[in-house]
Image (spheres, grey):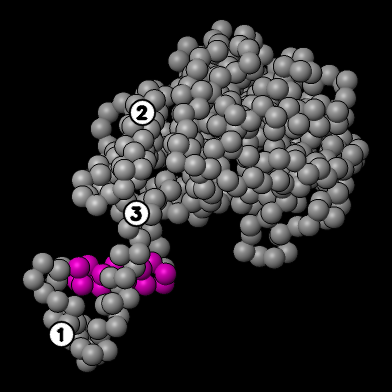
Amino acid sequence: MGAFQALAEKLSCPVCSGKVKDGKDALQCQSCQASFPVWGDFPWIFAHAGEWKADWTQRFRFYLQQLQEDIQNLKMELKLLDLLPKTRERLQALIQAKTEQHRELEKLFEPLLLGGGPSYEQQLAAQTPLPESQQLMGYYGNVLRDWGWGEEENQICEDMLAAMLGPHPLGTMLVLGTGPSRLAYDIHRRLGGRDTIALDINPFYLLVAERMLAGRNLHLYDFPIAPIDAKAVANRVKCRAPETLKSGFTCLMADAMDPCFQSASIDTLLTPWLIDIIPQDFRSFAKKLNRILKPGARWLNFGSTVFHHRLQHLCYSRDEIPEILEESGFEVLQVRENLIPYLRSPSSCQQRHEKVFSFLARKVKEVDAGPKYTALPNWLTDTDMSVPIQADMQQQMIVNLTLTQVLSQVDGQKSLRQIAEVMAPTFELPPQDVLPMLKRMFSRFVEGRGRHVNF
């Protein structure tokens, strides 16, 4: 019996929905024999776990490379001769902070950084835009708030949710989208959680959580957009948990869109800051959550309702959510709206409040969970299928070829006017009409300098 036996008994294979058993170095499906490795001290329950690890590992590497680029650029700025003394001090503070940040995160990421990887330039070329919820550092401020300077915020949220849950035992509690896991930790500790499973799709947050739960410190830097003074431009934050959790709390890498749990295996469900950032229809998502909950199980939601769907009918208002819950087999017990401080860093001039939406619902009937959620077409999930010819791909190919042709003319000698004369036959336009196009093209490069790419 391995360290994750109790967890394995509740899991469902994401490949065939079979039962999962705990092995020596990995969890495994008892039906299809799919393997789910343990990396970073937590299991990765995905149909293609190796691909997920490779993807996140490259993002870790890219972020570290980006920090190195920042440090080198700051050192170049420091060589300017006309700097103010205080400007020089600020740049030196940033160089020191980013150097220490690189060192600390390199140690944190170490379990996933074995072997080489693409260059900084190759990763820039291969990047794909992702929802903010899936970017490596999309919610970096939450790490600092959860385990560093946010005791007031953490206590307010803990008190509010504990009051909603009341004295009812938590049983097996699943936290979907746990992030750095402070809220899951606080509720587990305060209400005497027996078995808490903290699930997220971002390993950075789980690596932080594992370290906090083990009683180890982590020193990170707060780089506020609007620092309160020159010293606050890079503020060192000591992240730590109030006390170590010795048992009953497990971190899990998995996708909340189709929770990998056996039917009727969860007693309490907590979804903090999740329902409005998921890519699927909340009506479908609520029915999927019904499946994994036991009869009478409770679902506690907490966060915003800023749905980001292209189709407006999927951007539900707070008034529509109770109706969605009822059609999904739940009885709504409580609905609350509370104005709370949110990410109020002591280093920042920006002091924000958020009106959060909370509900407590109980499962009262079974509903059809519907088909498995798939965000990608078959040819992207089955890598042996042919890639279809698509109009937008062909358009992008033409755009990239054109850009390559233009950039190939940059030799340090030609002017924009001369490049326009060379490119005129390609565009089938006179040089004077090509020149404004080139100006716009190169302006985007100049304007984009210094902007970070989220990976």
Q: Secondary structure at mark 1?
A: helix
Determine which of the numbered discs, if any, sits on residue 100 in the image: 2
377 versus 89 height, above or below: below
Question: What amino acid is found at the position of numbered circle 3 in the picture?
Answer: Gly
Which badge, 1 or 2, comes first in the chain's sequence? 2
**How crowded is the residue under tag 1: few (<14 C-alpha within 10 Å), some, or many (20+)?**
some
Question: What amino acid is found at the position of numbered circle 1 in the picture?
Answer: Glu
Measure the C-alpha gap from mark 1 to mark 2.
Answer: 49 Å
Residue 395 drawn in magenta: yes
88 versus 241 height, above or below: below
Measure the C-alpha gap from mark 2 to mark 3.
Answer: 21 Å
The total of numbered circles placed on residues is 3
264 versus 352 height, above or below: above
User: Does 15 sit left or right of 57 as displayed?
Assistant: right
**How crowded is the residue under tag 3: few (<14 C-alpha within 10 Å), some, or many (20+)?**
few
Q: Secondary structure at mark 3?
A: loop
Residue that label 3 marks:
450
Determine which of the numbered discs, if any, sits on residue 421 in the image: 1
Magenta stretch bounds? 391-407
Residue placed furthest toward the left: 413
> Residue 255 location, x and y as percent?
58, 38
Q: Secondary structure at mark 2?
A: helix
Residue depicted at x 38% and y 58%: 387
Q: Nearer the viewer, residue 146 or 229?
A: 229
